[in-house]
Image: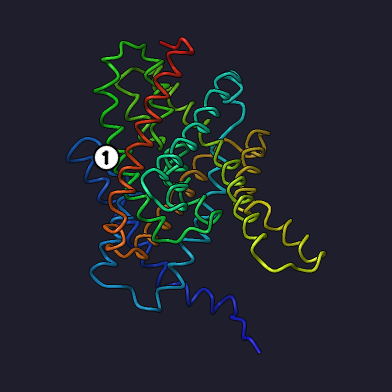
C-alpha cells in the first residue's frame, strides 16, 4: 500500500531546499544592489546572479538529499505559478493601441526567429531540446520562455540551466552592443527602440538598450517587448502539442475513454492556460490597478527562486560539455534576429 504524505509532512520536506533557494535569492538581490552602487547599472540581473550562485554552490558541495524536495518544488511548482502571475502584467489594450500591423510584425519576427534558430541548431549539431530552448529564449522573452518551454518539450534541468547561461551571455552582449551599433545606421529614436524591443529578451534590458535613444524609444521598445511576451502562450502550447503527438505515436494504445481524458488534460500545460487566462482577466479590468505591481514583483521573486534551484541542479561540467554547438547556435540566432529586426524596421518605414 502506498503511503501518502500529509500537508504538514510536505511542508517539512520542502523547507530545507526552499530555504536554501530563498537564501541564494537574497544574496543575489544584494549583489545586484552592489552592482548598481559601484557601477551605476546592473550588467547581471538578480535572475542570472541566482543561477550562477546556485551553480557555484553545487560545484563546491552538492546539496544533501534532504534539500532535493524543496529544490524541485522551487524549480517546478513555484516557477509554474510565476508564469501564471506573469500574465497579469500584460494588457491586450496596449497591443491594440499600437495597431494590429505592429502585432503582426512582431508575430512574424518571432516565427522567423524560431525557424532560423532551429535551422542554426541543426547546422551546429545541437540537440533538439536545447535548440528549441534557445529558439524560445531568443525569440520571446529569455529566461521565462526557456523555463516555460522546458516542461512542454520535456527538457532536463541541465539543458535548461546551460541554455540560460549561454543565452544570458549572448543577451548581455546585445544590450551592450546596440547603443554602439545603432547610431551608425542613422535611424530615428523610435526605430532604434523598436529594434531593441525586437532583439533584447528581458524588459529591464530592453529599457537599458533603448534609453540612450530617448523617451520615445524607451516607450516603443517596451511595448514591442511586451508583444513578444504575448507569444509565450501560443508557442509553448504548440510545442506541447507537438511533443505529445510524437509520444502518442510511440506509446501503447490506451482504452478510448482514458485516452480522450488524457489528451484533454495534456492538450495545453496548466501554467500556460493560466498565463493566457490572466492576460484576459487583466485586459477585462478585473484585477485592480493597485495589485498589478505586487503581482509582478511576486512573479519575479518566484522566478528568482526557480533560477537558484536550477543552478543547484547543474553540474558545471555539463556547461563546458555543451561547448561549441550551443555557443554557435546562440550567436547565429541573435545575429539573425538582429539583422532581420533592422530590416523589418526599415521596411515598415520607421526610420
Q: Residue at x 25, y 50 (%)?
A: 31
**Nearest the eye: 73 or 58:** 58
Residue at 59% across, 20% down: 97
Residue occupying image coordinates x 46% and y 45%: 297
Q: Is residue 104 left or right of residue 178?
A: right
Badge 1 crowding class, 10 Å Cα cut-off, few under 14, some 14 to 19, many 20 or more, is some
x then y, percent, for residue 89: 53, 38
Q: Is residue 34 left or right of residue 84?
A: left
Q: Which quarter shows the N terminus?
A: bottom right
Q: Horizontally, is 266 left or right of 24 in the view?
A: right
The quadrant in which residue 222 appears is top left
* Image coloring type: rainbow
Q: Looking at the picture, tell me which residue is in the foreground, 89 or 350.
A: 350
Rendering coords of residue 116 (x, y %): 45, 35
Q: Nearer the viewer, residue 78 or 146?
A: 146
Outermost residue to the left: 38
Q: Is residue 101 above or below residue 156?
A: above
Q: Quadrant of residue 257?
A: bottom right
Please, what secondary structure does the residue beneath circle 1 have?
loop
Residue tagged 1: 42
For the C terminus, the image quarter is top left
Residue 35 spot, x, y in % from top left: 22, 43
Between 331 and 277, the one lying in front of the other is 331
Number of numbered discs:
1
Residue that appears at 21% across and 35% down: 40
Q: Residue furthest bottom?
A: 1
Amino acid at each position: 500500500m502506498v503511503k501518502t504524505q500529509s500537508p504538514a509532512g510536505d511542508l517539512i520536506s520542502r523547507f530545507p531546499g526552499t530555504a536554501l533557494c530563498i537564501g541564494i535569492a537574497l544574496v543575489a538581490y544584494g549583489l545586484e544592489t552592489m552592482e548598481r552602487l559601484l557601477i551605476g547599472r546592473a550588467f547581471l540581473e538578480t535572475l542570472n546572479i541566482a543561477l550562477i550562485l546556485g551553480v557555484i554552490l553545487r560545484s563546491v558541495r552538492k546539496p544533501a538529499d534532504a534539500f532535493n524536495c524543496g529544490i524541485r518544488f522551487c524549480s517546478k511548482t513555484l516557477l509554474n505559478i510565476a508564469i501564471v502571475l506573469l500574465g497579469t502584467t500584460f494588457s491586450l489594450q496596449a497591443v491594440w493601441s499600437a495597431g494590429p500591423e505592429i502585432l503582426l510584425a512582431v508575430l512574424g519576427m518571432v516565427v522567423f526567429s524560431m525557424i532560423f534558430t532551429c535551422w542554426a541548431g541543426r547546422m551546429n549539431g545541437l540537440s533538439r531540446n536545447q535548440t528549441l530552448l534557445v529558439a524560445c529564449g531568443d525569440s520571446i522573452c529569455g529566461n521565462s520562455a526557456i523555463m516555460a518551454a522546458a516542461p512542454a518539450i520535456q527538457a532536463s534541468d541541465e539543458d535548461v540551466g546551460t541554455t540560460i547561461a549561454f543565452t544570458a551571455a549572448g543577451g548581455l552582449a546585445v544590450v551592450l552592443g546596440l547603443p554602439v551599433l545603432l547610431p551608425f545606421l542613422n535611424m530615428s529614436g523610435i526605430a532604434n527602440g523598436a529594434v531593441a524591443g525586437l532583439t533584447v529578451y528581458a524588459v529591464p534590458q530592453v529599457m537599458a538598450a533603448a534609453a540612450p535613444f530617448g523617451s520615445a524609444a524607451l516607450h516603443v521598445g517596451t511595448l514591442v517587448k511586451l508583444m513578444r511576451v504575448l507569444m509565450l502562450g501560443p508557442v509553448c502550447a504548440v510545442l506541447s502539442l507537438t511533443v505529445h503527438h510524437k509520444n502518442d505515436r510511440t506509446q501503447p494504445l490506451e482504452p478510448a475513454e482514458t485516452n480522450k481524458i488524457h489528451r484533454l488534460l495534456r492538450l495545453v500545460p496548466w501554467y500556460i492556460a493560466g498565463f493566457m487566462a490572466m492576460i484576459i482577466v487583466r485586459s477585462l479590468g478585473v484585477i485592480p490597478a493597485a495589485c498589478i505591481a505586487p503581482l509582478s514583483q511576486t512573479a519575479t521573486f518566484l522566478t528568482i527562486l526557480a533560477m537558484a534551484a536550477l543552478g543547484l541542479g547543474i553540474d558545471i561540467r555539463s556547461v563546458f560539455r555543451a561547448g561549441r554547438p550551443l555557443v554557435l547556435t546562440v550567436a547565429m540566432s541573435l545575429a539573425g534576429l538582429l539583422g532581420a529586426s533592422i530590416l523589418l524596421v526599415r521596411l515598415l518605414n520607421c526610420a
